[in-house]
Each structure stands twice: as structure tokens, then as C-alpha cells.
Image (tube, grey):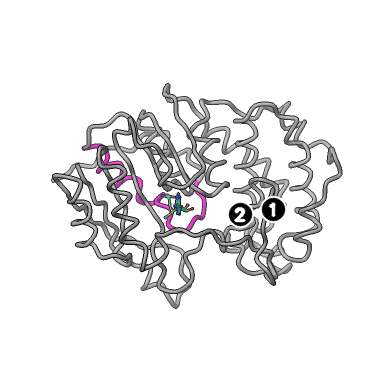
Amino acid sequence: MRTAVELPKRVKAFPQLRFMGSKYRLLPWIHDVLGELSFDSALDGFSGSGSVAYLLKSMGKQVTANDRLRFSHEIATAIVENPGVVVAPEDMELLLRANADKRDFIQRTFRGIFFEEADLAFLDLVWSNLPALDDPYKRALTLAALIRSSVKRQPRGVFTVAGDPEHYKDGRRDLRLSLREHFVEQVDTYNLAAFDNGRANHAFHGDVFDVDPKGIDLVYLDPPYVPRADDNCYVKRYHFLEGLATYWEGAEFTERSRVKKLKKPYTPFSYRRDATDAFDRLFRQFADSIIVLSYSSNGFPDLSTLVSLMGRYKKVVEVQGRDHRYHFGTHANVERNQVTEYLIVGQ
Ligand SMILES: C[S@@+](CC[C@H](N)C(=O)[O-])C[C@H]1O[C@@H](n2cnc3c(N)ncnc32)[C@H](O)[C@@H]1O
């Protein structure tokens, strides 16, 4: 029987994000499975909240984290690529000065939609002062702290519907605290999460199919699932965070969206007609690496199809299963969120 190996202590510092499909709660199990494999460099191809990339970094591996969401990329830059740079008190002074260029895009665009006026003004202010920080890791830490602050301050952590001002008077601490108060706490949290594991780690922002597979011993793949209903779109849920990561640079809003959603990017993993071929291409791309695929029992295509697809490129394909409940659903659909999680390992 497999014996559980203790999680590296470092993992406890990971700033957990309410993120659809996050594997944070599965990290001890993923660690056990990864711990039995022999590898030195690793790619997390769909890093999302960054939890698995952070685990790999904590295990002392040389890590590359990739996601095509900009805010995921900022988080990965802050805590995976970053070799231990922190935001110092004097940096905070710079960030919290008066709005350097009087910018107000966020206030004008999201007034009456999300947060309170002072919160929106605070986001404009931090962005106006961000260029004063000359270190890219300090900037990424600042953005990661703003992103996590926004998730905490936002009811349910998603941006699909406009916020009800009454929510912000809710007794719960996360909703009661202003964005400024959250931010001050979150900078400390991210500073504690930043560390050097002695390796040259990287954060990429792009399509997984554009990642060069050369020199990657192990690739961990956790793509989105083909949705049962139209509800797995990351940009639909997190468009505000995605915009915030770049101050909505070049943003294209969805027409007639009350909450100013950004346009939805295409990914083959979200469509029944494209997903099987996408998995095949992915396995071919990483045929020379150990492949570890996260898959859930409510995914598509089914488990046996994925195992035989991986078998085209790998001599041995092994499946590990584990019951898991995602905490995203409301009471009505909680059963749907009770799934078996699999790790399909190809060597
Ligand atoms: C299930 S989530 C990953 C969750 C992550 N393992 C965690 O623990 O937070 C899937 C991620 O895939 C990303 N994604 C979707 N299509 C992609 C593509 N073609 N290339 C890179 N990333 C993609 C999404 O932006 C999302 O962050």
C-alpha cells in the first residue's frame, strides 16, 4: 500500500484562491503520487491558482508554470518564478501614496457594478503607483495581492453578477473589510509565500500548445472540463481579475454585458467536438515527458478513452482515483460536485 509522505511545510504558505477546479485540497494526494516518480524539472501546463506549481516548487523541482489567463500568470510570477523578492515597507509607502496620475478607469467603468466607490478608487490608486516599483517580482506580488483581495471582497468570489451593496455590510469579515484593508494583509501573505528553492523557475503566459516540451521531465496537466452547461468559462467568472491584471489593457468587452465581461477566448478543452483531439495533441506534444493528467469522473471524454489515448505515446499508463467534493455548488447541485478525481500517469 502507498504510504503518505508528509507535505513539504512550505505548501502551507500557499495563498489559497477560490478558483474553479483548484486542486488545493488535493495537494497531499497529488504529492503522494508525484513523490513516487523520478523527475527533476516539471511543467504545470494549466496552472490556474498556482497550487500544483507551488507544490512542485516546494518539492525542490525546477518548475515552469503556464496558463493563458493573465491573472494566473501574475500569481505564478509572484510565487513560483519569484526567487524570494518581497514587497518592503518602503514599497508599500510608494504604492499607497496619492493617485500618481489621477487615473480613474476602474471607477468610471465599474461604478455601481462591483465593490464600493472607495474600493474602486483604491484599485486605480495602486495601479497608478505600480510603475514606481522597478522590480517585476514586486509588481507581480502587488498584483497577486490585489487579485486575492478582490476575490475575498467579492461575494462568492465570482464576477458573474453585479454586487449588491448590501452584501458589503454582511457580517463576514472578508466582505466587511475594505479593499485597502485586505490589500495590506494580502501583501504580507504573498511576501510569506515568496521563497527561493534554489532553482531557476519560470512563469509563462500562453497556450499550452505553444510550450516547448524540451527538457521537461514531468508535465502536470489539469485542463478545464467540457461543461455540462455553459458554466465552466474562467473569463466569465473572473473577467474582473483578468482585467485587473493588466489595467484592462487592450480589453475587449462583451457587448451588452451589464458587468462588463471580457470576450471569451476559445479553448478546445471546452468543446465536445474538439476535446478528444486536443488531448491527443497534448499527449503527443509531451510524449518524451512523464505525463500526469488530472481528470474527474464528470469529465469528457471518458476515462477509458483518455487511458487509451495516452497509451498511444506511453508504455505504462496507471490510474489513481480518489473521491472528492468541489465546494463550488449551491445546495441544489451539491451532488453533482461529488466526483471521483483521477490522476492518470503515463511513463
Ligand atoms: C482546472 S483549471 C487549473 C486549476 C489548477 N490546477 C489549480 O490548482 O488551481 C484549468 C486552467 O486551464 C487554463 N486554460 C484553459 N485552456 C488553456 C490553454 N489552451 N492553454 C493554457 N491554459 C489554458 C484556464 O485558464 C484555467 O486556469
Image spot of residue 299 (x, y percent): 33, 65
Q: Amino acid at mark 2?
A: Lys
* Residue at position x 66%, y 49% in the image: 244
- Tell me the residue at 29%/58% (across/down): 341
Work out whether residue 39 or residue 152 is closer to the camera in this orientation and state it: 39
- Label 2 secondary element: helix
Residue 303 highlighted magenta (yes or no): no
SS for callout 1: loop
Q: Residues within 10 Å of mark 1 (few under 14, many from 20)?
A: some
Q: 53 or 164: nearer the eye? A: 53
Q: Residue at x 65, y 38 (%)?
A: 142
Q: Nearer the viewer, mark 2 or mark 1?
A: 2
Q: Residues within 10 Å of mark 2 (few under 14, many from 20)?
A: many
Total numbered badges shown on the rendered structure: 2
- Tell me if label 2 and label 1 are in contact, CB under 8 Å: yes
| Cα separation between marks 2 and 1 | 9 Å
Answer above or below: position of 189 versus 256. Answer: above
Give the percent coordinates (x, y) of residue 91: 71, 29
* Magenta residue span: 16-36
> What residue do we see at 62% from left, 30% from top?
136
User: Could you say which disc has been placed on residue 152 in the image?
Assistant: 2
Amino acid found under the numbered disc labelled 1: Leu
Left or right, 126 with respect to 202, comes to right
Which quadrant is home to the C terminus?
top left
Q: Which residue is mark 1?
A: 177
Looking at the image, residue 39 sits to the left or right of residue 336; the answer is left
